[in-house]
Amino acid sequence: MASFQTVYQDRVVGELTCFDRVILKGHLTTLYPQGSFKAFLDSQGVRLADFADYVSRVSADLKAHAQALAADAGRPYEYLQGTMTKATGHSKEDFVRQIAARDRVDSGLVAVLATVEPCRSFGVRGNHASHRLEVVRQPRKCLFFYFYFLDPRLGLIHVRLQSWFPFETQIWLNGHYALAKALDARGIGYRMHANSFTQVDDLDLAQRLADRFSARNWLPWLNTLAQRVNPMLPVLELAGFGGYYWVTDQTEVSTDVLFSSRPALEQVTPELFQHATTTFSSEDILRFLGRKPHPALKAEVGTSTRHRSEGWRVKHRLGRNSIKVYDKGPCLRVETTINDPTALRAWRTTEHVTGTSRRRHLVRHRQLAPVRKGIANLRTIYQAGRAANQRYLDALATAATHGSAVRQLDRLCHPRVHGHRRHAPFSPLSARDLAIFRAVLAGENTIIGFANRDLAQHLYPKPARDPVDRARRCAATSRLIAKLRGHGLIRKLPGRRRYRTTQRGRDFLSTIITLHDRDIPALLSAA
C-alpha cells in the first residue's frame, strides 16, 4: 500500500513522530498487601488508635517540606481554590507559564501549587466481628502538591504528590518540549505552533532525537525526583518497604505530517476526514495496534467527529485506548493514546523450571504476551503507537487513490487466469461480494492477516449447525481465498496459513466500498 507521504508528496515536506503527553506514576506497592501497612505502623511504634494523629502529622510535615522547597528556591507556593482545567480556559500549566514569564525563570523550580482532590488512602475502622481496629483502603479527599520544574533536558514538567498515605506520585512530561530542548542544545532551528513542530531544519536528526526519548534510563531520574519532593521515602526505605514502583499511566504518541502550507492542507482536509469517518470503525484502534477487540468491549467503542474553531478532529475510541486525527496549523496529526497497554502484545521471554528435584532445567520460552505498565515497557509502547499512527496514515492515503483505482475496477468483472487455473469474476456491487470485500478489509487483517476461520467468521455470523456444515463452510472459504489470490487482491504470508491484502487489493476494495456507501447514494439523491 502506498504511504501517505508518497500519495501527497507534492504537498508534504516531512513527517515527525514523537511522544506527546506522558504520565508516569509511582506506587509504593509494598504497602498494599494485606497487613503490610499495619506492619509499617508497628515499625514506627504507632498504634492503630493513634493512626489519625500520626497521618495528620505526616501530612503536615509534607506540606512544610513543600513550602520550604519553594522558599529555598525563592519561588511561590500557591493554594488553589477549586480546579483549573483547560475546558474552562484555565489550566495549571498556563498559570505556571505566566509565573515563569513574569519572573523570567528559565530553569529549576517554577512554583508549587496545592489543591484538594479525591484520592484513595488508608483508614482505620472497627471490626464488629473481632471487636478490633483494622486498616482499610478507602476513598477520601486530601491535599495534593504540584511541583513545577523547568528541566534543562525535558522542558516544563510537574510532579504531583499525594499528601496522605500511600503518597501516590505522578510525573507529567511532554515529548515535544523535550525534543525542543534537544534541538536547542544542538543549534537546530525550528518553529512551533500549539505544541507542534511546523518546520525543522534537520528532520532526520529530529526524528533520531525523538526516538531516543523512550530509550532513556528513566529509573534513576524518577527516583531522584521523588526523593526531592517526598521526605517520607527515607523513612519507608529504612523500615524495609523500599521505594516507588514506576508505571506508565498514560502515553500519547503523535505523528505530525508537515504540509508546505496551511492552504495546501485545507485543500485535502475534507476528503481525508470524510474518509476517516466513513471508512474506519472504532474497533480499528486495537486492530491497528495488532489486536482483536474482545466482545466485552463492544459497548465501549465510539467514533466522534468534531469541528473546532481551527479545524477538524476525528476520534476513534475502544475501551481506554484511542486514535484521533486532526489538523493543527499546517500539520496533520495522528495521535495514539494508550491508557491500557495490556491491550497490546509484544514478544517476551519467560522462564520456568522443569524436571525432578535432582535434575532441574531452566527453560526459556519466547512468546507474545500482553504489554505490562512497567516503565521498562515505555519503548515498546512508543513503537506500538508509532506503528499504529503509520498504519492509520497509510489507510487514510487510500482516500486519494480512488480515481486511479476506479479505472481498473472492470478487471474484477472479468474472469482471470492465474497459472493454470481460471478464476471467476467478481460482481463489485452485489451484496455477497461486498460482504467478502468488507471481511477482507476488516481492521485486524491490517496487522496479522487472516486465516480461513477468520474470514468464515465474518461471512457466516451464525455458528455451524453440525460438523458437515462446518466442513462445507471451510471448503467454500478456501475456494474464495483462491479466487481472491487469483485476482491479485490478497497474498499468502510466507511460512504461514494466513493472508493479507495487497496494495492493489486494498486500493480496489476500499474504492468499491466507498463508491457503494457514499458516492453512488449521493449521485442518486442528486439525480
Image (spheres, rainbow, N blue to C red):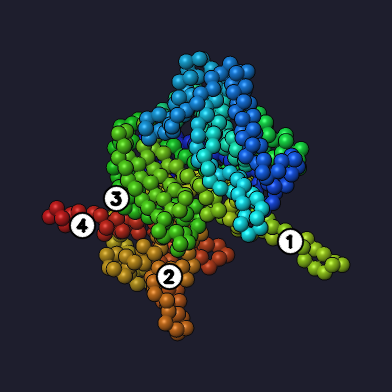
Sequence order check, earlier mark of 4 and 3: 3
Q: Nearer the viewer, residue 350 or 407?
A: 350
Name the front one of labels 3 and 1: 1
Give the Cα distance between marks 3 and 1. Answer: 56 Å
**Which label was assigned to residue 457?**
2
Of callouts 4 and 1, which one flags the residue occurring earlier in the amino acid sequence?
Answer: 1
Q: Nearer the viewer, mark 2 or mark 1?
A: 1
Residue displayed at 74% across by 61% down: 352
Q: Which residue has dot 3 on it?
A: 403
Secondary structure under badge 4? helix
- Secondary structure at badge 1 equals strand
Gap between marks 2 and 1 measured at Cα: 36 Å
Which residue is denoted by mark 1 in the rendering? 352
Mark 4, residue position: 521
Amino acid of disc 1? His
Residue displayed at 29% across by 55% down? 514
Pick whichever of labels 3 and 2 is earlier in the sequence: 3
- Image check: 407 left or right of 22? left
Q: Amino acid at mark 2?
A: Gln
Q: Tell me the distance, in whole angstroms, between the alpha carbons under discs 4 and 3.
A: 18 Å
